[in-house]
Image: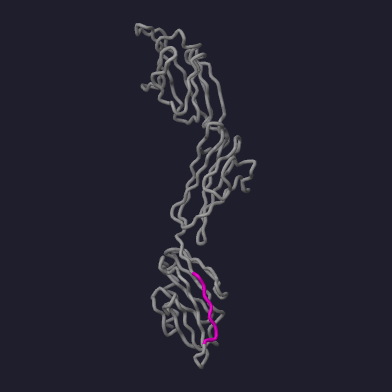
Amino acid sequence: MTAVIGLLLMLFSVTDGVVTHCDGRQNGTQCYGALGGSVFLQLMDDFSEIHRYYLYKKNTVVLSGRKDQQPDSIMNNRYSFIPSNGTFWINNLSRNDSDEYSLRTFDTNGKQTSIHSLQLSVQAPVSSVSLVSECLSQGEMKVSCSSEGGDSPQYRWTLNGKSLTEAELLSGNKQTNIITLKQHVSGRLVCSVWNHVSSVSNETNICTCGIESFCDSRQDEAQCYGADGGTVFIQLMNDTSQTDVYEWRKGNFIILKGKKYEITANILENRSSFFFNNGTFMIKNLSKSDSGEYRLTVFDSEGQMTETRTTWLTVKVEEDQNCER
């Protein structure tokens, strides 16, 4: 009865951890357990016909017993042993439990009848997965998959339930944590991260990058539209050769400032260009935060305002998809 109560207590104590099972009846078996979890190691079918047995961790005896008896030696209160099915149980696994374990059996004369070993490796399980995507200059999409915790993580990607193909991948492969998708690839992208003791996944709906739009804002109150993650070309003026000073603002912030063929300020420099010959401002990798009211103001050489115009830019997400970038 005492043994049954002890077993029940151990069952309740491991419910919060990862439980793994390993058939260690073959010599040289590689087994894995989760850090903080429990592992069941099946050493034999049963021990009812074994006169004497010892289980070693390296050179230390962790378990010993005799035929038809409960074990007479278990060195650690995290260990448990069930002779009827030959299962050795380690609870609340730590890094120190990783080692070689060897089982030795003996007959009534004390002669060794068998020996076989297994290797136990304790790994930290993967706890969570995050995805980050980014549109690149030519309309490709770079996606990074990162995980919390987890020893020796491995990666697997699927798109719309199927493995990624070479036709969809520009660089990387479906076993790496960073991939680059070709232009016009879209759908439900899933990254699965796993090791020998855990498996976690995360998914996102991705839309195509690099959608281009053009808007003529040379008339006051022009309405311009761009696609989330795409590029918009906004023509602000005919050219800059006859313009002494010009400013393009969003609210109180100067987005672009220049004079004739010289740019003196460009807050979006890392994702924009300005073309002097036709007065067009290009913004790439658009996001919803780019939406808003923009105002162009032109000044003469004396600093007097000669013209002002307002443009409204709306950045839209592709319809019918909850896209991430």
Residue 307 horizontal/vertical position (percent): 42, 9
In the image shown, does 309 or 57 lie closer to the viewer? 57
Residue 301 horizontal/vertical position (percent): 37, 7
In the image shown, does 177 or 112 lie closer to the viewer? 112
Q: Can you tell which quarter of the image residue 79 is in?
A: bottom left
Q: Is residue 56 visible?
A: yes
Q: Can you tell which quarter of the image residue 250 is in?
A: top left
In the image shown, does 197 or 295 lie closer to the viewer? 197
Q: Tell whether position 301 is magenta.
A: no
Q: Is residue 5 visible?
A: no
In this view, 35 is above or below 70? above
**Residue in the picture at 48% in, 42% down:** 132
In this view, 25 is above or below 237? below
**Residue in the picture at 64% in, 43% down:** 166
On-image quarter of the N terminus:
bottom left
Span of residues in magenta: 112-119
**Residue in the picture at 38% in, 7% down:** 300
Residue 115 horizontal/vertical position (percent): 53, 80
Residue 283 horizontal/vertical position (percent): 49, 25
